[in-house]
Image (cartoon, rainbow, N blue to C red):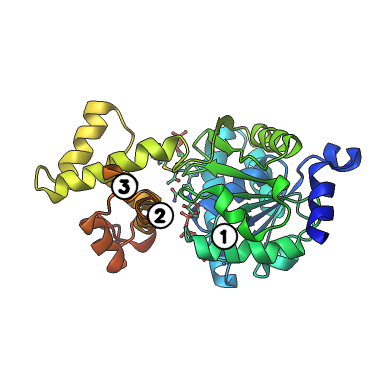
Amino acid sequence: MAHFVKTCIRGFSTSAVREQAIKCVTVIGGGQMGAGIAQVAATTGHQVVIVDQSEDILNKSKASIHKSLQRVAKKKFADDAKGGEAFISEAIDRVSIQTDATNAVGNADLVIEAIVENLDVKKQLFTVLDKAAPQHTIFTSNTSMSYVSSLLALTEWYMLFGGLHLFNPVPVMKLLEVIRIPQTSDDTFDKLLAFGKSMQKTTVNCKDTPGFIVNRLLVPYMVEAVRLVERGDASTRDVDTAMKLGAGYPMGPFELCDYVGLDTMKFIMDGWCEKYPDNPLFQPSAMLNKLVEEGKVGVKAGEGFYSYKKK
Ligand code: CAA
Ligand code: NAD
């Protein structure tokens, strides 16, 4: 009964709730994506809370936001140093940090989950959030791999659920994939599109399918590059050079794997392979798995296909 009442209130919300624009955003996960999402939400006028597992991680998130804001300000306020400083401090002031997810969603109009790409951990998080968030809070996931709908299993308020898939680096990449599942209400979907616009992103819509649009094409391409090197057909450096100079890509596939994170790449491949074991594009790669096993997960670890350690 409680379930019925909650979903009715959420799905057929009162006009007061309907009109409520997204002002307060809680971003769960302050890693490379979470920090980028929080930054852009703050520079576009939203109040933001970032949640992560420790103060130490959260302080690193804030430091990376600060560094990134400086890069943005350097261009945007090239001839106006004071304007640049104000831009940075106003954005920073809109961001607070929290280690307790239940406290952090008390005022949230929107939750964007950007934690580790592990379905069980994500599900556990949404179970907790479902009990703590106010009735109007929209829940979204920035997942690269999972079905957004598989995260619904433990939440009661499914009409207020959708996917918001942003791209790395969030302050630079202009796209937002908005994922609508059958249960997403029209009101929720409209609010997600409006939020994307307020973040100054171009939105595209996609059904809840593996990798949505971009990753469905990009991840198999990146893993195919790994297979090419595994076969000994070419070196990582030459494949990267070839794709940058021959196809005009800003990064080669190995640079991009390291940039995205090899742990995330492996989670994506493992998830797809489990669900579609016969699809040749979704087969695991021994080279990728070995690097992850060794903790060489890319730029964030200082080493992946390439080394990023300062000499
Ligand atoms: N914050 C703010 N600004 C940043 C930034 C950041 N984190 N990173 C780069 N920039 C800005 C720089 O300030 C610079 O601005 P100007 O040109 O105006 O001076 C511009 O971006 C270019 O940066 P750089 O000169 O440092 O380096 P670059 O030219 O090599 O570009 C890049 C860096 C933008 C990351 C570029 O290499 C690129 O577009 N790479 C491909 C990224 C990509 O494909 N992302 C998608 C990954 S897949 C994904 O995200 C989905 C998933 O689920 C896995
Ligand atoms: P990341 O490893 O940089 O950050 C993940 C963060 O989540 C870490 O700071 C970790 O401490 C935190 N975390 C883990 N469990 C948590 C919990 N229970 N509660 C709070 N925080 C928790 O990863 P990322 O690259 O930012 O990716 C995050 C999500 O975004 C993943 O689902 C990933 O697939 C997706 N994504 C990644 C990219 C990319 O290029 N890396 C692009 C788009 C989407």
In this orientation, does residue 257 appear?
A: yes
Compute the Cα span from label 1 to label 3. 27 Å
- Pointer 1: what residue? 29
Q: Residues within 10 Å of mark 3 (few under 14, many from 20)?
A: many
Tell whether circle 3 marks a residue whose Cβ is less than 8 angstroms from ligand 1. no
Tell whether circle 1 marks a residue whose Cβ is less than 8 angstroms from ligand 2. yes
Compute the Cα span from label 1 to label 2. 20 Å
127 and 253: which one is in front?
127
Amino acid type of the residue that numbered disc 1 sits on in the rendered structure:
Gly
x, y (%) of residue 199? Answer: 64, 37
Amino acid type of the residue that numbered disc 3 sits on in the rendered structure:
Phe
Instruction: Single out the mark in the foreground, 1 or 2.
Output: 2
In this orientation, does residue 51 appear?
A: no
Q: Tell me if residue 182 comes above or below residue 106 in the rendering.
A: above
Instruction: Single out the mark in the foreground, 1 or 3.
Output: 3
Q: Tell me if residue 224 comes above or below residue 244 in the rendering.
A: below
- Pointer 3: what residue? 282
Q: Earlier in the sequence, mark 1 or mark 3?
A: 1
